[in-house]
């Protein structure tokens, strides 16, 4: 035991000497860490009581407040402070301090890699999941604490009648009691704490995986909106040039005025589509910025839809299945805790009694134990067993859903990739060549305006379909990355 403890006890005894009228402190009884005294006056008794509390604080070596109950029977207070168990070592990043979302603006020209990093650093969902992990660590640490010892002080036979009048027959008993925490309660609490920590850490990983999927999909939507805006600008420029050419031909008498009106109408429609594409592109960037927890969107997004295509994947256990396994382990640990709670948990106490009339002292000992007559924790045990059944069912469902999710994502990715390949290799090149020939023929007067407009619309439709196919490919790739995330 450290020397500072005995120094505190000696200081307490020296303070008690005036109360006992002794110069060397020999008349002050000491029982382990507890110094006991009785006084002939109520003031001295109060002073001694305060000093005893200080002595108990020295014994526990913790900043705790003693909880005093009925002094007739030594009992134990609620568990609060005790020697902390060693925290489990964590090498992964979940053991790091909670990240504070940065306040600096996001990059003006945002890439996919930057978007993922910004989301992980700024997202409120990540901060909340990290806080839940820290809370689980705190509960695990608390689970290792033992119950506090309890100090009880009992004063008997004072202010009575006859021989017990005043303080002549006063008896002061000071005792310390401790619940033994037997029956595997502490280890059961720690098992539950470790299981809760594992669940919280997996939920953090799932939150990160979900956020990464949302960022990839929303980034793909922003890139697709940018490409649609590019197509709308090109259509608007072609329509404006065609309207100019049609007006020149009408003035030259080579085309009837109706052709110029038709070209001008197509140009106006292209302008309206351009305005809609601009609004959709700005909205997609704002939605992407909302995933970071910021209101100011980036000025633009960099990269292409092919940046989101997946790398090689391996058949591993999905995060959702791992979470279901962890929740089953938590339910089983909770059952063991409930079984431990129904076991006997005795408390023992030891103290000193001072008889004022004779000046004698004597030891007192106590033993208390709840009798499991009615409450044997039956309801909590039954509930814990039912929770295990529910966790097993959820694990089976998670396994089926995980395999189905991976299969669907791979099928959608294959279909989207085939569509992209067909559009890139045939539809787009053929549409561009058809438009080129139509423009030359129209300028030579070999075809009418309606045929040129049809060629422009066909190319625009093919380009839009290619953007949609690439977007579906990117979304399927993001879903596959989430389904196989670790």
Image (cartoon, rainbow, N blue to C red):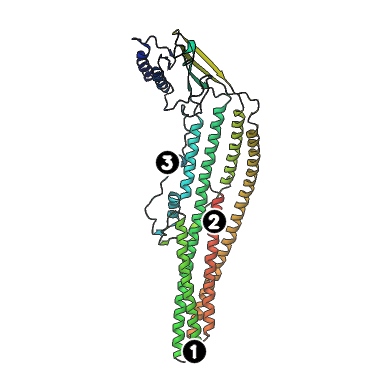
Q: Position of residue 31 (x, y in %)?
A: 45, 14
Q: Which residue is mark 2?
A: 477
Tag 3's secondary structure? Answer: loop
Q: Which residue is mark 1?
A: 257
Q: Residue at x 54, y 72 (%)?
A: 461
Q: Position of residue 386 (x, y in %)?
A: 65, 38
Q: Position of residue 284 (x, y in %)?
A: 47, 62
Residue 420 in the figure: left or right of residue 292: right
Q: From this viewpoint, which residue is outermost toward the left? A: 23
Q: Is residue 6 above or below residue 196?
A: above
Earlier residue among tags 2 and 3: 3
Mark on residue 97?
Answer: 3
Q: Nearer the viewer, mark 2 or mark 1?
A: 1
Residue 295 in the figure: left or right of residue 322: left
Q: Is residue 443 above or below residue 425?
A: below
The Cα–Cα distance between marks 1 and 3, rounded to whole angstroms, is: 73 Å
Within 10 Å of disc 3 (Cα), the crowding (few <14, some 14-19, many 20+) is few
Tag 1's secondary structure? Answer: helix
């Amino acid at each position: 035991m450290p020397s500072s403890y005995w120094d505190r006890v000696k200081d307490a005894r020296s303070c008690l000497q005036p109360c006992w009228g002794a110069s060397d402190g020999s008349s002050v009884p000491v029982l382990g860490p507890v110094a006991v005294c009785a006084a002939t006056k109520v003031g001295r008794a109060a002073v001694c009581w305060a000093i005893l509390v200080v002595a108990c604080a020295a014994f526990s070596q913790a900043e705790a407040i003693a909880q005093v109950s009925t002094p007739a029977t030594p009992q134990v207070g609620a568990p609060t402070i005790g020697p902390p168990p060693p925290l489990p070592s964590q090498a992964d990043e979940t053991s790091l301090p909670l990240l504070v979302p940065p306040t600096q603006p996001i990059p003006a020209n945002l890439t996919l890699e930057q978007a993922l990093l910004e989301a992980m650093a700024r997202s409120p969902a990540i901060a909340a999941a990290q806080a839940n992990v820290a809370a689980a660590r705190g509960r695990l640490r608390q689970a290792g604490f033992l119950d506090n010892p309890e100090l009880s002080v009992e004063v008997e036979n004072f202010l009575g009648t006859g021989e017990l009048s005043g303080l002549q027959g006063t008896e002061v008993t000071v005792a310390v009691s401790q619940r033994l925490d037997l029956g595997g309660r502490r280890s059961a609490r720690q098992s539950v704490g470790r299981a809760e920590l594992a669940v919280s850490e997996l939920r953090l990983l799932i939150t990160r995986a979900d956020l990464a999927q949302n960022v990839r999909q929303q980034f793909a939507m922003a890139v697709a909106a940018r490409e649609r805006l590019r197509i709308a600008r090109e259509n608007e420029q072609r329509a404006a040039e065609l309207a100019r050419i049609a007006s020149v031909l009408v003035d030259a008498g080579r085309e009837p005025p109706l052709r110029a009106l038709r070209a001008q109408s197509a140009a106006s429609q292209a302008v309206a589509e351009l305005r809609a594409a601009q609004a959709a592109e700005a909205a997609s960037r704002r939605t992407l910025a909302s995933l970071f927890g910021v209101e100011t969107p980036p000025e633009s997004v960099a990269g292409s839809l092919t940046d989101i295509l997946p790398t090689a994947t391996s058949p591993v256990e999905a995060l959702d299945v791992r979470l279901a396994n962890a929740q089953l382990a938590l339910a089983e640990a909770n059952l063991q805790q409930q079984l431990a709670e129904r076991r006997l948990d005795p408390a023992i106490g030891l103290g000193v009694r001072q008889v004022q009339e004779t000046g004698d002292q004597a030891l007192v000992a106590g033993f208390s134990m709840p009798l499991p007559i009615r409450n044997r924790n039956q309801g909590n045990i039954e509930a814990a067993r039912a929770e295990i059944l529910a966790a097993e069912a959820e694990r089976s469902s998670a396994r089926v859903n995980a395999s189905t999710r991976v299969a669907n994502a791979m099928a959608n990715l294959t279909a989207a990739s085939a569509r992209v390949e067909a559009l890139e290799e045939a539809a787009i090149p053929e549409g561009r060549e058809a438009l080129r020939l139509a423009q030359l023929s129209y300028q030579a007067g070999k075809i009418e305006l309606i045929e040129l407009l049809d060629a422009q619309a066909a190319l625009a439709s093919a380009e839009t379909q290619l953007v949609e196919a690439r977007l579906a490919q990117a979304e399927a790739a993001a879903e596959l990355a989430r389904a196989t995330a670790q």
